[in-house]
Each structure stands twice: as C-alpha cells, then as structure tokens.
Image (cartoon, rainbow, N blue to C red):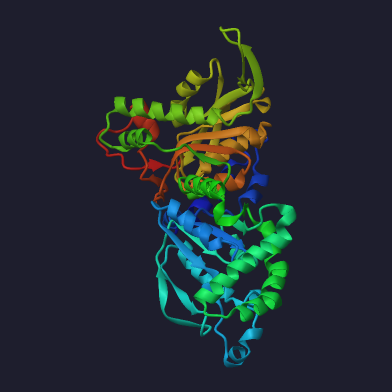
Amino acid sequence: MEVSAMASKSVMDLMEASSGVHFSGFHMDALKQRIKDIEAPTTSATENMHKQPFVIGVAGGAASGKTTVCDMIIQQLHDQRVVLVNQDSFYHDLNEEELRRVHEYNFDHPDAFDTEQLLCVMEKLKHGQAVDIPNYDFKSYKNLFPARRINPSDVILLEGILIFHDPRVRESMNMKIFVDTAIRSFMRNAQDADVRLARRIRRDTSEKGRDIGAVLDQYSKFVKPAFDDFILPTKKYADIIIPRGGDNHVAIDLIVQHIRTKLGQHDLCKIYPNLYVIQSTFQIRGMHTLIRDSQTTKHDFVFYADRLIRLVVEHGLGHLPFTEKQVMTPTGSVYTGVDFCKRLCGVSVIRSGESMENALRACCKGIKIGKILIHREGDNGQHLIYEKLPMDISERHVLLLDPILGTGNSAVQAISLLLKKGVPESNIIFLNLISAPQGVHVVCKCFPRIKIVTSEIEIGLNKDFRVIPGMGEFGDRYFGTDDDDQQVVAAPCQ
C-alpha cells in the first residue's frame, strides 16, 4: 500500500477511535469533514517538491525592455541555475495562405501563439525534465531544427508580451513582473508608445531584416491595437511593475534579493504561509548532524537537542502579538520598544514534548504548561487518554510542544482538543524540531490558521510510518530509556 493511502487511513482511523471515550463530550465529527479529502504525498512525491523551480514571468509591450530585464536578473543570479524561455519561440508555423498574406497576419494576438505547447514545456521543466524549445525563424515564419535544449534549473524566466493573458500560464508563475517604459504615469500613453516604437524599428530592421515601411504599417495595424486590447489589461496581474525597464537598477536589485530569499525557503513554505522553517546555518546543520548520529552519547544528544529546541522556541515566540511600549533608559532617554504577550501558556504532548518544557521556561518566566497524553495503538490509530490544561486556556495563546511531526495524527488530536477547549485556531503555535511533509500537509490543511515552527523539513515517511532520515525515538534518546542493544535508525510518527 502506498504511504499516502496509509497515512490518510491512519488519520481517519484515529477519528473513529477518539469519539466517545476518554473525554466527555469530545467529538471530532466536524473535523472528519475537514480532512476527508486530505492525502499526504508519498515519499517520492515529497522528494520531487524540493526540485520545484522558481518561475518568474516577465511581460510588457513589444520592445519595452523585457529581455534586458531578464538578462540583468540572469547576470545577478550567476551562482544559480537560470534559464530563459521566450514566448516568441512558440509562434504557430504559418501555412501557405498565411505566408502569402503575412503582412496581414497579427503576431501580437493571443491566437498567434501555441500556448498548449508552452504549457507542456513549462510543466516538464517544473517537474525536473529537460525540454526542447522550438527555434522559430522570423524570416520564414516556421520552426527550424535543431531545437534549443534546456535543462532543469533553479529559476525559470518566462518572457513574452502575452504570458499573463492565459490564466493557466499565470498560475505556473511564482512571481509576475510587468515592464513599463514610461517614466511618469501621466506621460505613459504618448511616451511609452514612442519609446516602444523606436525600439521596435531598431530591432526589426536589424534582427529580422524588415524595412521601416513594413514595420510602421504593422505597428499601426496590429502592434498598438493589440497592446491596448490584450497586453495592457494584463498589467493588473503583475506582482511588480518596473518603470523604465532595464534602466531601473534599484527595482531589479530588489527583485533579485527577493528571488534569493525565496530560493532559500523550503517549497512547503511557498504552499503554506503558516509554515515557518528557521533559517539554516552551519551551526544549526552541525547540531542536527550530532543529534541524528546514532553513535552520539545521551549527554551530547540532550545538550545539542536543547540548543535546537531553544532556537525553535525563540522563533515561535517571535510570532506572538505585541504592543508598543516606551521605557526610560539609564541615560534619561526614551526607548520605544514592545511589550511581551502576557496571556501565554505551553502545552506539551507527553512524553517527548516534555523535553521542550525547560527551553520554554527559560524563555518565559513562570509560564504555565499543560499536558496532553496520546496513546498509540499500532500505526493506524491513536487515543487521547489524558489532559491537564490551564482552566483559562481559551483566553491564552498556546505554544504546542512536540519535537517530531510525522503523519500529523498526534497533532490533529492535540489541536482538536485545544479547539474543543475554546482556544482560537489562530492562537496556536505548534513547535517541533523536525517535520515530515506528510504531517505538514495534514496539519496545515486541517488547521490553516495555526502556525507551525520547525527547524528542518525531512524527506518523508517510510513504509512503517517512521520519519526519515529522522533522529531515532526522540523521547527514549532524550530521557535515556532507549534499548542500548537495539540500534535506533528512525523516529516513529508522533
């Protein structure tokens, strides 16, 4: 059986097991409907998610400076794998009748492009496959061979006048840029058209071998009307509008900075805005290396696990609401800062979650910490069998503590109990050290308003529902209750 089907079955089984016992009035009928269609991806599918490229669409009128903008982005991202895909490569071949009347053919109309072929190429690139891009000849108006081979890359720049026109193409993009040649908005109609016309004349006469008369005739008949009818209306879909095109170095620098930030994020963070992975450093990677090593002693495991837990807790506290506060410094100056959230508590999932309590107490003096015990029955069902929570928990922000997020079953149970106790979903921050993508999918889809803070996203789950590469049975390793004669190789789902 596939992991996805088993994980989904596991979630549903735990719902059946939790209705009626252990908690008076604790039922999950509403939650059943919410996660009815959730299926966690298989391990292989999860691995492919790491290879998803960052797709940037660059649109604008003809000769507006799109290619210049793309070239500048590519130049600044020299340390990344970047490819450029031009919409111009996907023109339809002209038949004999169209060739005879080529001066009447509108190359700026959406129907002039083979959008289906473009979508096919983009889909393959997004799934890590090499593709052949058509080599369109603007003198014969046909695709020539050989085609241009493009390999999978980290960044795909898709450039063209009408790439925002088809919603299917737009949906494939992570960022949409519209290049505008105008300097001031009130000058746009006249100046933008003049600049684009001058550039088009230069380009078409030198690169495509056309005479000026033909260029001007085509511009007045097709180019300008198409810009007003098809291209300009797509400007509203842009995330970023760059005035002055390639001359706007500040805008391009900011775009490149944003791209670098996004490339550093895990792909799941792009899907779920409520998922936060703390920024990795060599120190963090080194600590992960130590706690994952099966030969690491208990003393070292606890020491470095505590350091990582403290980082996760601090990051989680940063997502709490705050109020502005002014204080007087010893120099007699006024400092404007913020005041910590007062209504806060922790809830640990017994037993491994208790390993995170000391870090929380060290960060929040006198904090109340509740407990939830979830009993596993094999791999397909779990029962809530014990809870001890603050009486006023519904009025507090809650930091839910559990170092491992595997299938998401325990998290679903624990969060559902907190909701039953009246805690608003948006008041819950779930803290863990490592998270399997399957668990992230389940929790984020069931509870889209909670926040998940973790230090690393794992590869996935194996056939036994154990997190891989994992760090072993976390509770046993932390509290020293593991069997020394048995090698610990993977963490069970929490």
Looking at the picture, does residue 72 appear above or below residue 116? above
Q: Position of residue 405 (x, y in %)?
A: 47, 40
Q: Position of residue 447 (x, y in %)?
A: 61, 43
Residue located at (64% from left, 22% from top): 343
Residue located at (61% from left, 67% from top): 198
Say which of 491 and 65 sits in front.
Answer: 65
Assign the N terminus to one quadrant of the image.
bottom left
Which residue extends farthest front?
212
Q: Position of residue 395 (x, y in %)?
A: 68, 25
Q: Is residue 302 left or right of residue 231?
A: left
Q: Quadrant of residue 400?
A: top right
Count of numbered marks: 0
Residue 23 shows up from this direction: no
Residue located at (46% from left, 77% from top): 135
Looking at the picture, does residue 24 appear above or below residue 389? below
Q: Is residue 70 left or right of residue 293?
A: right
Looking at the picture, does residue 189 appear above or below residue 242? below
Residue located at (64% from left, 49% from top): 34
Residue 126 shows up from this direction: yes
Say which of 408 and 444 sits in front.
Answer: 444
Which residue extends farthest right?
186
Say which of 196 and 13 sits in front.
Answer: 196
Q: Is residue 273 left or right of residue 358?
A: right
